[in-house]
C-alpha cells in the first residue's frame, strides 16, 4: 500500500477504512483497474464523496439525550465508544447542512458530558 494512502487511512474511522477496502477491491477485481495503487486512490475518493469530513477525524452526531435529539461533534475515538452502546445515534456527514438547517448558519461549541448506560461521554 502506498505511504500516502496509509497516512490518509490512519486519519479515518474504522468504518471508513472498511469501506475503503471494499471499494478498492471492487474497483480492482470487478472493474479490472490496475495497478492496485490506482484502485486504492479511487477508493479514497469514494470515501470522500460519501463523507467529505472523513479526513477531519471528527463526526457530526445526532443523539437522543433526555428524550430530545441534539447535535454533537465527536472525535473518531469517542464516536467508536458511543457507537458501541445502544444509544440512538445518527451520523450526519454534511456539517454545513447541519449548521444551516439546525443552527441558522452558526453554532457555538461548548462542553457537555453525557451519561449513557453508566458510561460518561
Image: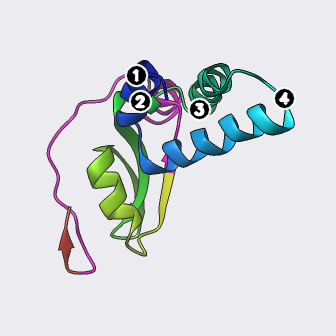
Q: Are marks 4 and 3 in contact (CB under 8 Å)?
A: no
Instruction: Say which residue appears at 16% left-offset and 58% top-offset.
Output: 113
Q: CA distance from mark 2 to mark 3?
A: 14 Å
Residue position marked by numbered label 3 in the rendering: 47
Report if residue 115 lies within the magenta region.
yes
Relative to residue 61, is residue 93 depicted above or below?
A: above
Which of the marked residues, 4 or 2, is nearer the chain's N terminus?
Answer: 2
Spot occupied by residue 24 in the image (x, y as percentages of width and height):
66, 35
Q: CA distance from mark 3 to mark 1?
A: 18 Å
SS at badge 2: helix
Q: Are marks 4 and 2 in contact (CB under 8 Å)?
A: no
Residue position marked by numbered label 4 in the rendering: 32
SS at badge 1: helix
Point out the frontmost of discs 4 and 3: 4
Relative to residue 71, is residue 1 depicted above or below?
A: above
Instruction: Say which residue appears at 70% left-offset and 40% top-offset.
Output: 25
Q: Residues within 10 Å of mark 4 (few under 14, many from 20)?
A: few
Which of the marked residues, 1 or 4, is nearer the chain's N terminus?
Answer: 1
Which of the marked residues, 2 or 3, is nearer the chain's N terminus?
Answer: 2
Spot occupied by residue 112 in the image (x, y as percentages of width and height):
17, 52
Q: Residues within 10 Å of mark 1 (few under 14, many from 20)?
A: few
The single residue placed furthest to the front in the displayed view is 35
Residue position marked by numbered label 2 in the rendering: 6
Q: CA distance from mark 2 to mark 1?
A: 5 Å
Q: CA distance from mark 1 to mark 4?
A: 23 Å
Q: Residues within 10 Å of mark 2 (few under 14, many from 20)?
A: few
Report if residue 2 lies within the magenta region.
no
* Residue extent of the magenta highlight: 91-117
| Image-based side of 26 in relation to 53, left or right | right
Q: Are marks 2 and 1 in contact (CB under 8 Å)?
A: yes
Residue position marked by numbered label 1 in the rendering: 3
The single residue placed furthest to the bottom in the displayed view is 118
Amino acid at each position: 500500500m502506498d505511504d500516502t494512502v496509509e497516512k490518509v487511512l490512519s486519519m479515518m474511522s474504522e468504518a471508513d477504512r472498511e469501506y475503503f477496502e471494499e471499494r478498492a477491491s471492487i474497483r480492482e477485481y470487478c472493474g479490472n483497474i490496475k495497478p492496485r495503487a490506482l484502485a486504492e486512490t479511487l477508493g479514497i475518493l469514494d470515501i470522500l464523496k460519501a463523507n467529505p469530513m472523513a479526513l477531519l477525524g471528527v463526526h457530526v452526531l445526532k443523539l437522543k439525550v433526555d428524550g430530545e435529539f441534539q447535535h454533537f461533534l465527536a472525535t473518531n475515538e469517542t464516536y467508536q465508544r458511543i457507537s458501541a452502546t445502544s444509544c440512538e445515534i445518527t451520523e450526519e456527514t454534511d456539517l454545513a447542512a447541519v449548521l444551516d438547517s439546525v443552527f441558522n448558519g452558526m453554532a457555538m461549541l461548548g462542553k457537555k458530558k453525557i451519561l449513557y448506560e453508566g458510561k460518561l461521554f
